Image (tube, rainbow, N blue to C red):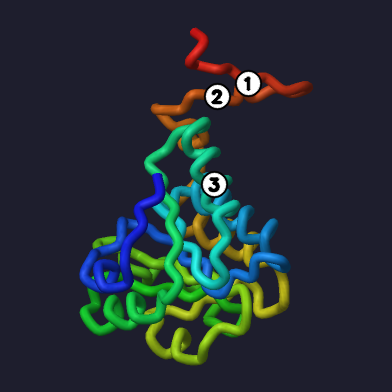
């Protein structure tokens, strides 16, 4: 499910409808948070997650494994230098760049004005985000102007942008399906049926 692209091919390629870019991943410090960002992106309706920063095959393997087992039209890939891609997208206006930051405009006031007629790239920082990201983003959006988890910010933003999850919890090509249960765990392996 990984689609390794060179920097040059990324610049000329339109992103899918909804991409999440994890900017500045630090393998030792951010492993779990980055893993959860990708899982949240997938579960809440994104089409792909792009990892940048320190290369970390384990994050891509986790996302690919979950997608293989639980289905979905979701891809993941690594991009060591995402800024040329973001600059190109910004210059060509081929996608809308949404930067999630606690310094941005309130999400409740902003999310309805974000166009859905072209691809959207949601940028979520790890290390200090370059100032240029604030400038080239079409929207700098805050889910609470306070320090908190980037996973929670992504979940709240995607829920408000994509819409409620009702009916989207299971993907058609899933090998495994979770059945809601008041008590206990019920998982159906659809390959065995």
Q: Residue drawn at (71%, 66%), measured in percent from left and top?
A: 28
As helix, strand or loop, the secondary structure at mark 2 comes to strand
- N-terminal of the pair, mark 3 or mark 2, is 3
Q: Position of residue 20 (x, y in %)?
A: 46, 62
- The residue tagged 1 is 187
Q: Residue drawn at (39%, 67%), measured in percent from left and top?
A: 121
Q: Is residue 111 visible?
A: no
Q: Position of residue 68 (x, y in %)?
A: 47, 34
User: Does residue 101 appear left or right of residue 91 in this picture?
Assistant: right
Query: What's the mark number on residue 177?
Result: 2
Nearer to me, 102 or 107? 102
- The residue tagged 3 is 61
User: Does residue 29 appear left or right of residue 56 in this picture?
Assistant: right
Nearer the viewer's eye, disc 3 or disc 2? 3
- Name the outermost residue toward the right: 183
Label 3, residues with CA under 10 Å away: few <14, some 14-19, many ≥20: some
User: Does residue 71 appear left or right of residue 126 in this picture?
Assistant: left
Q: Is residue 84 visible?
A: yes
How far, Cα to Cα, is label 3 from label 2? 20 Å
Asked whether the residues under the numbered discs 1 and 2 touch, taking CB atoms below 8 Å apart as contact, a structural biologist would say yes
- The picture quadrant where one finds residue 38 is bottom right
Taking 18 as reference, is 99 above or below it? below
Taking 154 as reference, is 2 above or below it? above
User: Does residue 187 appear left or right of residue 92 in this picture?
Assistant: right
Q: Position of residue 12 (x, y in %)?
A: 21, 70
């Amino acid at each position: 499910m990984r689609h390794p692209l060179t920097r040059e091919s990324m610049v000329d390629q339109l992103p899918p409808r909804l991409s999440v870019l994890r900017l500045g991943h630090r393998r030792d410090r951010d492993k779990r948070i980055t893993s959860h960002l990708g899982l949240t992106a997938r579960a809440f309706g994104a089409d792909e997650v792009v990892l940048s920063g320190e290369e970390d095959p384990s994050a891509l393997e986790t996302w690919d494994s979950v997608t293989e087992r639980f289905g979905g039209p979701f891809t993941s890939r690594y991009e060591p230098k995402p800024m040329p891609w973001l600059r190109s997208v910004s210059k060509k206006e081929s996608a809308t760049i949404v930067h999630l930051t606690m310094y941005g405009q309130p999400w409740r006031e902003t999310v309805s004005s974000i166009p859905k007629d072209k691809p959207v790239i949601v940028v979520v920082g790890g290390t200090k985000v370059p100032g240029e990201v604030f400038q080239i983003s079409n929207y700098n959006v805050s889910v609470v102007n306070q320090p908190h988890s980037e996973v929670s910010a992504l979940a709240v933003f995607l829920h408000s942008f994509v819409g409620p999850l009702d009916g989207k919890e299971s993907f058609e090509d899933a090998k495994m399906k979770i059945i809601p249960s008041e008590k206990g765990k019920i998982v159906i392996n659809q390959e065995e049926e």
